[in-house]
Image (spheres, rainbow, N blue to C red):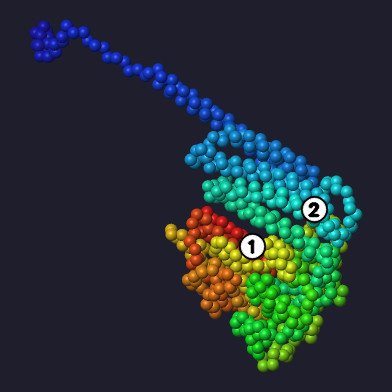
Amino acid sequence: MENIENQESSSILIPKIDVSEPIQPVAPVSIPKKRNKIVIGILIFLGVFLIYNLIAGFLIYQSGMKLSASLKSLSAVAKTQDFPKIKAGITDTRKKLIGFENSTKLIVWAKILPFAGAYVSDVDHVVKAGKAGLDLGETVLTTIQPYSDLLGLKGTNVPTTGEKTAQERIDFLVNTIPGLVPQIDAISGKVKIIQAELSKVNPDRYPEKYKGQEIRSKIKSAQDLLSEASTFVVNGKPLLESVPYLLGMDSPRTYFLLFQNDKELRPTGGFLTGYAIMKVDKAKFEPVLSDDIYNLDAKYKPSILAPDPLIKYIKGPYVLSKNLRLRDMNWSPDFPTSMSTFTTALKEVGVNNIDGVISVDTHVLENLLNVIGPIGVSGFGNFNTNIDPQCNCSQVIHELESYADVEGPIIWDPLTGKIISKPKNADNRKKIIGPLMNSILANALAQPKEKLPDLFQAGFKSLVEKHVLFYIFDPKVQAAVSDFGLAGSMNDYNGDYLHINDANLGGRKSNLYATEEVEQDIKVARDGSATKTVTITYKNPQSQDGWLNSVLPTWVRIYVPKGSQLIASEGLDNKSEPYEDLGKTVFAGFFQLRPEGVAKVTFQYKLPFKVSKEYKLMMQKQPGTDGFLYTVKLGKHEEEFYLKTDKEIKIGL
């Protein structure tokens, strides 16, 4: 064993160590005390920051929920029209809004952050808009308190002024208008603040939906609503100032009341079917006479060349003479332009000393009868808005059309231009309109106060949806009604524009059943150039009856920005070359829609300008129509709505 151990030890090399020099110890790694303090400080700061934001978030959430509950309560109370409760609701909501505002100040620092800062700023804009909105609510309540009877408000404690009829209440309203005008400025100021704050919020930053709830579209709807409200209030002041003139408060007025049959659609709202002369003295209406437009037309000597579509498709009197008849003088979609020609012709047939023209269509009759209920007209029977199965339309429409046309159309001799065939009651067929309107007016003015809010709503609906149009000779008053959208004017616009205008050239009442769906598809290239496709789908679901509903020959015109270049059009039997009118480029053509049929017309064109950052579009509704379905598509953006009145939309790119 010893030998083995000696052999193993002798085979191992052992390094020699110089023990004469001491071994230097390795210094341990150490963190400077200053650095330790920095790390600890950062950790403490992050902890405090986290706790701070958790607490801030909780407080914001808590105050936000309280504000949301208060807003829902205010919305519910507003529907009750209880004046004291509405005021109390505004006060409570203001407190909750201030509480929410105070809580959001805890994160005001976050505005400097690249991503989150934009959302924090949006909250600030919404809060400021909300405060201005509550101020607006209080101002409006104070302004309308004297008119609580008219508006159906409860609990205002306004002493009664003894008005018992609608006429007396209207007199009261008109006499107090001078006191209302100054309040418009205060209301307008608040609306502008709200609009300015909400316009700074970019809807495209937000998701389309969150937990099944629409988000982006609601933000855009609110912005659009505020934009419309701002224009509405600002333009409301001159109109309000013109009301005493329109109602003859200073001097009696005489108006030519023109009836347009929207069931036989024409450019300004309907075929000119009848008329009445109406006097207004201190807000009291007195009909002078009413008659058929044909009787007036018989006195007129045509001297103006008629548009080609009338000559080509109506034929009848235009076979003998190509000059325009008085009853067809609403060919321009711009109501003031049409009425300028029409009123010149009125002077030639002896209609003088009028202060302007007011047109109405059948929607006005239906809107008012829906509130008033059934009425009787001496010598003509009873009228209501119940659906009549004979025509699948309201009874009042069926009676009006049957009285006028059930026995057949008027037929002219193509050589002499004289009538060779007509219904036996043709000479009196439209005298019903005057007595009917007089009866509706008398019934409306005799309604109890409980019906007044609904009557005002029906009247307002008729106005804003272009079923009542004004052409007043006084320039200042005409400017006021035009700015408010009551003149049927085709407006200038800095951006994309669309107005679709249909003219029924068949004499039948097929527009009673025909509907439209309009789709606009916009493509914007990288260089900003834009191409647009407008597809109009016409439908008539009703079967042919040989009387009201038949083949609908239509001349369609679409008005687009001046300089637009037509690429292609489809679905037309006859096409017109593009031309300019009213400061717009017009694409037009002829097609026919059959009962229980569908017709599709498409126009593709290039816009005359480039689009950057924001696409803007103005759509103007044709008077007399009932609000067709519109769809606008641009990239991922898609918007759908019924065009009840003129509408502007803006899409960020």
Q: Secondary structure at mark 2?
A: helix
Q: In the image, which disc is placed on residue 646? A: 1
Query: Measured from the top left, where is residue 653 in percent x and y?
Result: 50, 54
Circle 2 crowding by C-alpha within 10 Å: few under 14, some 14–19, many from 20: few
Q: What residue type is disc 2 on?
A: Gly
Q: Residue at x 15, y 9 (%)?
A: 18
Local packing at callout 1 (Cα closer than 10 Å; few below 14, some 14-19, many 20+) is some
| N-terminal-most mark, 2 or 1 | 2
Label 1 sits on a secondary structure element that is: loop
Seen from this angle, which residue lies furthest right?
A: 162
Point out the frontmost of discs 2 and 1: 2
Q: Residue at x 68, y 55 (%)?
A: 234
- Is residue 397 in sight in this rendering? no
Determine the image quadrant of residue 93: top right
Q: Is residue 423 above or below residue 232?
A: below
Q: Is residue 150 above or below residue 296?
A: above
Q: Position of residue 118 (x, y in %)?
A: 53, 42
Q: Nearer the viewer, residue 262 or 355?
A: 355
Q: Residue at x 49, y 57 (%)?
A: 612
Q: Is residue 42 visible?
A: yes
